[in-house]
Amino acid sequence: MLRVGVTGGIGSGKSTVARRLGELGAHVVDADAVAREVVEAGEPTLLLIRERFGDGVVRDDGTLDRAALAAIVFPDGEALDALDAITGPAIAERVARQRGRVPAGVVSVYDMPLLVERGLWVHEHLSIAVEADVETRVRRLVEQRGLAEGDVRHRIAAQATDEQRRAVSDVVLDNSGSPAELVSAVDALWRDRLLPYEANLAAGIRSRRPDRASDCVVEPRPDWEARAERVVARLAAALEPTGVDTEVSHIGSTSVPGLLAKDVIDVQVGVRRLADADRDDVRAALADAGYVFSDGNHSDTPHPKGADPGGWAKRFLGGCDPGNHVHVHVREHGSAGWRFALLFRDWLRHESHERDAYAAEKRRLLAEHETTSDYVAAKEAWFEGAWQRANRWAERTDWRPR
Ligand code: ADP
């Protein structure tokens, strides 16, 4: 089941997007609706609120007196935190229950205003931010929903900014145009990314980079770093409950600013023992996060030539998102292969002439090799020399893996 989070500031068009995804076939959970349900008359959460804030917050008919509760919690940060501590787990539990009932093959959408503020986006396979500038949002809410302007501006100021949302969003939908334009952007996203992503997840198929090397290798893209940061955060969150000691890092050419590269985000997961990666719960956590094990790729080419291959063992997984090709290399912390991945990155980040020489070599090989796999294989010869130079640099600069 593909989990998609939809967020946006008040009046951005978030609900409009969630509604359209529902019409297209997604199952939608509305966080605001769940937040209202958990405090309905007779709910255990309402009893807890009454215990904490007094009888005055419940009306004679047993329903929550929102105004009375707001008067207590809004001026008092501690009281607001206490309310969040009561309602937060109840909402999370109900949302999880509702999403747990979504049948396989159906996209599960979580319409959540505080996806970013609460850090919940890491549990979604994909997060979508809906954006419109503040003045447009204020106008729409005042004119169409009859809200008071001062109230709207106050709420906008209390929410995350567009920049904060964009940093953790895989997709940004611009809603400065007409409703029809927004709907057609949602339809295209559904067709081109969400449905294929869901199909890949359901079948356990990783998304493939283009076969033609010239289609795959691109000039450096400005979004590589942010894409990698999201991958790293999601993988760390997925592995956390397994208790396995891991460190997740962005590696490879997309981690070197200014270097042309295959449009693939490479990530290294360092584990204490490689056997950890083969544990059933770890595999299940990675599969749930959208990563598929590749059983035919258990080693890197050892360096220097003839070195013990044991130090170069790994596990390899590919991500299922057709809009973000991701390769995950699981290596034993401290092994030769683990160390070289980090050294190679840091060396090329610091030695711009080496980065440029590598780019020149890539261009030469691209002209010679048509398929991406031939191109990748041809790069290996260059790597042996690079390994030597990187290690000399490490010695000279007293480099240590971080
Ligand atoms: P949110 O859920 O982010 O608060 P909504 O989807 O409810 O936002 O949209 C806020 C208001 O603006 C609604 O009244 C909605 O009908 C309207 N709206 C949304 N998108 C547009 C648009 N592109 N043009 C005009 N009005 C819009």
Image (cartoon, helix red, strand yellow):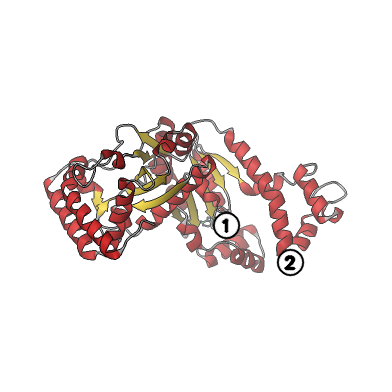
- Most foreground residue, 139 or 229: 229
- Most foreground residue, 58 or 338: 338
**Which residue extends farthest left?**
368
- Most foreground residue, 175 or 247: 247
Q: Which mark is residue 117?
A: 1
Q: Residues within 10 Å of mark 2 (few under 14, many from 20)?
A: few
User: Picture coordinates of residue 103 (x, y %)?
Assistant: 53, 30
Residue occupying image coordinates x 69% and y 58%: 81
- Most foreground residue, 8 or 52: 52
Marked residue nearer the N-terminal end (1 or 2): 2
**Which residue extends farthest right?**
60
Label 1 element class = loop
The kind of residue on which mark 2 rests is Pro
User: Picture coordinates of residue 333 (x, y %)?
Assistant: 39, 47
Q: Is residue 158 above or below residue 296?
A: below
Label 2 element class = loop
Residue occupying image coordinates x 84% and y 55%: 54
Q: Is residue 65 above or below residue 37?
A: below
User: Picture coordinates of residue 231 (x, y %)?
Assistant: 42, 49
The kind of residue on which mark 1 rests is Glu
According to the image, label 2 marks what residue?
Answer: 75
Q: Which mark is residue 28?
A: none
Q: Is residue 132 visible?
A: no
Q: Name the quarter showing ligand 1.
A: bottom right
Judge left or right: residue 256 versus residue 271: left
Q: Considering the image in quadrants, where does the C terminus appear? A: bottom left
User: Picture coordinates of residue 350 (x, y %)?
Assistant: 28, 64
